[in-house]
Image: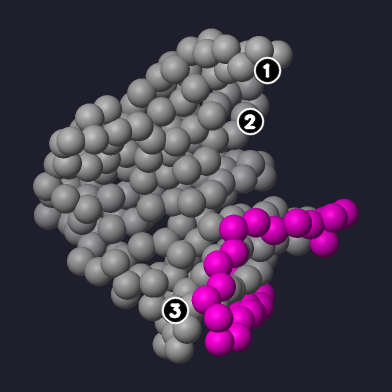
Amino acid sequence: MAGDIDQDPDLPASNINGFLLEVNRNTGANVWQRNYTLGNAESFQKALLYNGAIYTTGRYNFDATGTARWRPGITKLNLNGMQQWSRLYLRPVTNTTAARLASSDMVADNGLVVLGHGDLGGTSTTDVSLFLFKTDDDGNLLWAMDYDIPGATSEASTQLVSVPDGYVCLGYYTAAGQDVFIFKTDKQGQLLWSKSYGNNSTEDAFDLVHSNGQ
């Protein structure tokens, strides 16, 4: 289980840590729990098992000065939850470089591919874009792509699916109303197509079902 834990809800959000929890599948008993922090408001959005290790991704905040220090990150842990390494991506990890970025999903595909969203300038919660990047097994960045929906605000990514000829990305955004988007890329993150779905209602989308690679 992966997520975040607020160890004292009466304090500001800077008290939030990412956590991992292993439970016994037969009884539900807690086997171990680990909390992780870089110092300010971490959250694990996805965990996966890959090549005999646990990998997590989510929101990493390396400085207590605010959300402009959010970065998408990857952490590698052993099967007992002990951290092997953590890396932050897409913008420099300095107190003079603002960015408000968080990853939402990750898949293993001869390396690790991460989907997320945020503001590269670090100032807005609505003037945001979407990103996709790939690393090797050691967390070294191989490529990164940024996507923006014309006329849209508040883009939020929710799921990433690997298919034989690329990646399919799901989420929602605001234009005249709130609609759902799906876009597909090739294996290097180059956009192949994008579609939106919605009517006069407010739509969210959180999961994709695919069968036989389709």
State which quarter of the image contains the C terminus: bottom right
Three-letter residue code for mark 3 = Thr
Across and down, in percent, residue 102 comes to: 38, 53
Q: Is residue 40 above or below residue 119?
A: above
Disc 1: which residue = 25
The disc placed on residue 174 is 3
Quarter of the image where one finds residue 127: bottom left
Q: Is residue 83 visible?
A: yes
80 or 108: which is nearer to us? 80
The disc placed on residue 50 is 2
Q: Secondary structure at mark 3?
A: strand
Residue 208 included in the magenta stretch of the image: yes
Three-letter residue code for mark 2 = Tyr
Q: CA distance from mark 1 to mark 3?
A: 40 Å
Three-letter residue code for mark 1 = Arg
Q: Residue at x 59, y 64 (%)?
A: 205
Q: Is residue 136 above or below residue 114?
A: above
Q: Around disc 2, counting alpha carbons within 10 Å, would you say few (fewer than 14), some (14 to 19), or many (20 or more)?
A: some
The magenta segment: 190-214
Q: Is residue 150 above or below residue 190?
A: below
